[in-house]
């Protein structure tokens, strides 16, 4: 991924990544993901193009058959005037009806929630990747950390062996 002037990164799929929620994959089992457009104001887009956003406390709510992104922090645009936006306002998500219905059915089940995973631009349009998630227990988190550590040690041992070093 190449880092641009704005602080956002560009990946191989042509997506210009603005923000990602790294903690989400640690705290939740992601069962399904959806790409959604967002209804934004002009100053929000300018702030996002500068690579400024935080998805940490964000979540998605289905209200009246519409999906809403809540608690996502997009800071005010520095050069904005009285038309500037509120940093944590409610933002409408653009999804197909069948996707909203599927999400609504799953969220009605106990333990499911919808969280934002990443915020990016595709062909100049702001998109958010949301994940249908189920919370992990603390032992799940410890087990995942142990697996990552074991894999890392295994790869290091293979690397040492290939270089002719002893364990």
Image (spheres, rainbow, N blue to C red):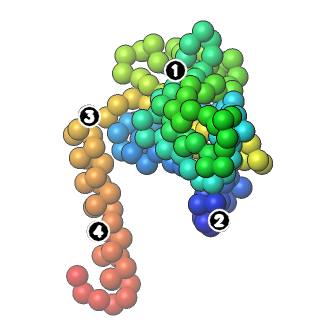
Dot 1 crowding, Cα within 10 Å, few <14, some 14–19, many 20+: many
Please identify the residue farthest to the bottom as the structure is shown.
Answer: 164
Name the residue located 56 percent from the left edge and 32 percent from the top edge. Answer: 86
Residue 33 in sight here: no
First in sequence: mark 2 vs mark 3: 2
- Look at discs 3 and 1 and give the one toward the viewer: 1
Name the residue located 64 percent from the left edge and 60 percent from the top edge. Answer: 6
Name the residue located 62 percent from the left edge and 46 percent from the top edge. Answer: 77
Question: Which numbered tag is attached to residue 155?
Answer: none
Give the distance between the C-alpha atoms of the residues marked 4 and 1, in whole angstroms: 41 Å
Mark 4 sits on what residue?
Answer: 153
Please identify the residue farthest to the front as the structure is shown.
Answer: 82
Residue 143 sits above or below residue 110 on the image: below
First in sequence: mark 4 vs mark 3: 3
Mark 1 sits on what residue?
Answer: 61
Question: Which numbered tag is attached to residue 4?
Answer: 2
Residue 133 sits above or below residue 80 on the image: above
Label 2: state its secondary structure.
loop
The picture places residue 66, in percent across and down from the top left corner, at 63, 16
Give the distance between the C-alpha atoms of the residues marked 4 and 3, in whole angstroms: 25 Å
- Look at discs 4 and 2 and give the one toward the viewer: 2
The picture places residue 9, in percent across and down from the top left corner, at 61, 60
| Badge 4 vs badge 1, beta-carbon distance below 8 Å | no
First in sequence: mark 3 vs mark 1: 1
Name the residue located 58 percent from the left edge and 38 percent from the top edge. Answer: 129
The picture places residue 76, in percent across and down from the top left corner, at 58, 42
Q: Quadrant of residue 137?
A: top left
First in sequence: mark 4 vs mark 2: 2
First in sequence: mark 2 vs mark 1: 2
């Amino acid at each position: 991924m190449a880092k641009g002037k704005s602080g956002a990164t560009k990946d191989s799929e042509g997506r210009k990544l603005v923000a990602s929620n790294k903690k989400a994959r640690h705290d939740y089992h992601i069962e399904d993901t959806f790409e959604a457009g967002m209804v934004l104001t002009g100053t929000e887009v300018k702030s996002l193009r500068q690579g400024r956003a935080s998805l940490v406390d964000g979540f998605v709510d289905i209200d009246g058959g519409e999906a809403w992104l809540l608690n996502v922090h997009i800071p005010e645009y520095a050069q904005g005037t009285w038309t500037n936006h509120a940093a944590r306002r409610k933002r409408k998500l653009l999804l197909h009806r069948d996707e909203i219905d599927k999400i609504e059915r799953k969220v009605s089940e106990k333990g499911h929630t919808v969280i934002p995973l990443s915020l990016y631009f595709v062909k100049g349009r702001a998109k958010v990747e949301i994940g249908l998630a189920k919370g992990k227990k603390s032992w799940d988190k410890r087990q995942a950390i142990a697996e990552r550590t074991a894999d890392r040690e295994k790869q290091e041992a293979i690397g040492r062996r290939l270089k002719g070093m002893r364990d």
